[in-house]
Amino acid sequence: MSLLRFKMVDAAINHTAVPVEAPEGRPSDYFGEKVFGRDAMRKYLNKATYDALVDTMENGTPLTREVADSIAAGMRQWALEHGADHYTHWFQPLTGGTAEKHDAFAEPDGCGGVLEEFSGKLLVQQEPDASSFPNGGIRNTFEARGYSAWDPASPAFIVDTTLCIPTVFISYTGEALDYKVPLLRSINAVDRAATEVCRYFDKNVQKVYSYLGWEQEYFLVDESLWAVRPDLMLTGRTLMGHESAKNQQLEDHYFGAIPTRVMAFMKELEYECLKLGIPVKTRHNEVAPNQYELAPVYEEANLANDHNQLLMTIMDKIARRHKFRVLLHEKPFKGINGSGKHNNWSLGTDTGVNLLGPGRTASENLQFITFLVNVISAVHKHNGLLKASVMSATNDHRLGANEAPPAIISSFLGTQVSAVLDKLAASSGDDAIRFDAKNVFKMSGISHIPTLLLDNTDRNRTSPFAFTGNRFEFRAVGSSDNCAEAMIVLNTAVAHELTAFKAAVDARIEAGMKKEKAIYEVLKAMIEACKPIRFDGNGYSDAWRIEAVRRGLDCETSTPLVFDRYLDEETLAMFGEMGVFSKVELEARTEVKWETYVKKIQIEGRVLGDLAMNHIVPIASKYEAMLLDKVYKMAQLPGLNAESDIALIKRIQRHTAEIQRLTGRMIDARKVANRIEEMRAKAIAYHDTVAVCFDQIRRHIDKLEEIVDDQIWPLPKYRELLFLR
Ligand code: ADP
Ligand code: MG
């Protein structure tokens, strides 16, 4: 192996577990200690301020300036006592990730000293100097102002020595420039629509929450090896690399014993998470070597999403302390599983009922079926849009690959729920739904729906949108995604569907029909109409692709074209009616999506071109020269046969020539694409003419990796990246 590679592998081997700062006490002692949550609020705010803030958090009542000042004073004191010296508005711009600009609490007091300052004004609103955040043209440079505004629903927290205040990020003219604004709007939309529908069943329901429980998959790679892989460093994935002889075929990594150094990382990560109020619960090895997963207990979606964003940041920080780099790219390595996020999603009432969980009474179960059917109907109508919400240049490699959900959205319900829906749809007339003396819900053929006990083992791992007993699990989300994007679409689509459902039921009731019968009739029609979205079979099979086309599901695989779904008439109408996105916002965000796609592919193209031309071709040529030298010398001696060496030289020749030719072609394609002004057309050009070159070039590089002397190969190989830890 090359000297550099040898040094890095040696370093990796010698990286041993660093001692974890031992947590003092039990999780219940330190959980949330870095969060300005209810306990801290009670301690640092006076009663009136506390009550006003809780009212804002729970009911959205606007804060007065006096209250804001009083909260800021309490928050400052808490933060200073907990070691903070700076504060920042913490927001989620469309770049992905989070943004922060730290300001010191200390301010000159005008008399030669400093004072720790923090007013309500600074807490509530700021104007980040942020004209360079992606905005899709909403803020052109002469109106570059954007505002960040405090989201009291998500508590402030301390990272290192900085008080972080979760905020929304909007333009001067009020358009959303982040993920949080539309997420909050979608949460409100589904709350309004679902509460109305709940009242058919229980008049006491005042509010419906959307819940999110994410599962985060990731890879760990040793830092020294990472540092000599420019592709990993700059694009987050390996653009080349021959498959390791052993990878995941033995299936020995999934749920296997966690390696010591990884365990030390996980423990520290969990400790940090718990202090930050992230209720982490589950950790395990994933399917691929060096792949892992972490999942918390589900929370209200806005908070859960902030926690996921925060997690991704601190994961990176802690990984470095353990001489790892965390890879959140959806497909860092070819030939083995990629990483996703599973968004477990449900709706629940303020009376404590999970609307996607079967209940004990007839009424509860009719309610359950009502919500379930509305969800799958919404997913059916907007399956293309839901896919668009998770498509990206990076997730592109995962969706449709062999281990991940296909790039077609369908829903798996399990045999029991499927049977219930089929019976409901097939039964006819008034006898289909009856209530007996004990108010037990009876349908022809199914005697006791009330005791629906859903079998959790009835699972389908290939389904992108699976019902898992008391929630839906959206599995197509990318590991690096902001969960909000998918949640915005899902919440809004479900809100829209519930609104239409309510209107249809009310119309029947007004015409004199009994409530249960009206609900039943509308559901029956919906079950029939959304049938194409239900699929319990193998989502990876070719047969399904053909079948999905026949069913009219969105089967587009080109990422830039899938983004078009954001601008469909139905989409504009849905987001508009639900008050989640205006047309201007959707146009701007789609523009950002295309632009981000272009930039990512552009960077990959450059890195691949550089590596091909200044790492791979020179090394291959060096080896070739060695062989040529040998062949020349052999010719000096009688009786030696250089045929096999000459054949090898020819192979190297062929691969290096192809690499050079294809790299030239890729660069030309990039030049052509770069001249295109319109962002959508540019993204399509990048997809169709630039990205297609990557695998072609890579094929030849990977062949060379197989034949070139390992002593001089410069890049750490898959076996080193995946098995050293
Ligand atoms: P899996 O078998 O898919 O790994 P887990 O039991 O690990 O499932 O749970 C995955 C996630 O689902 C966790 O974050 C959990 O909190 C979440 N979850 C459980 N119930 C609900 C629910 N009702 N709504 C939303 N998320 C939920
Ligand atoms: Mg899961």
Image (tube, helix red, strand yellow):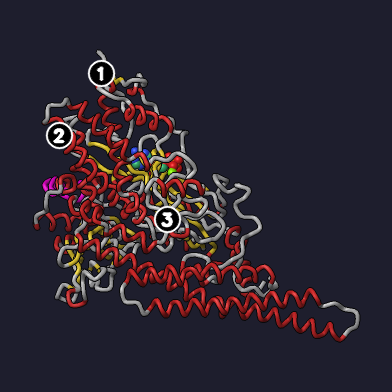
Q: Quadrant of ligand 1?
A: top left
Overall secondary structure of the magenta stretch?
A: helix
Residue at x 63%, y 48% (from the top left corner): 250
- Number of labels in the image equals 3
- The residue identified by callout 1 is 435
Q: CA distance from mark 3 to mark 1?
A: 47 Å
- What kind of residue is marked 1? Phe
In this orientation, does residue 332 appear?
yes
Closer-to-camera residue (410/249):
410
Residue at x 49%, y 43% (from the top left corner): 538
Specify few, some or many for label 3: CA neighbours under 10 Å numbering under 14, 14-19, or 20 or more.
Answer: many
Q: CA distance from mark 2 to mark 3?
A: 42 Å
Q: Where the C terminus falls, by quadrant?
A: bottom right
Secondary structure, mark 3, is loop
Secondary structure, mark 1, is strand
Closer-to-camera residue (150/467):
467
**Label 3 near ligand 2 (CB < 8 Å):** no
- The residue identified by callout 3 is 479
Task: Indicate the position of residue 322 as horizontal and vertical percent values.
Answer: 50, 60
Residue 510 appears left or right of 181: left
- What kind of residue is marked 2? Asp
Q: Which residues are magenta?
A: 42-53
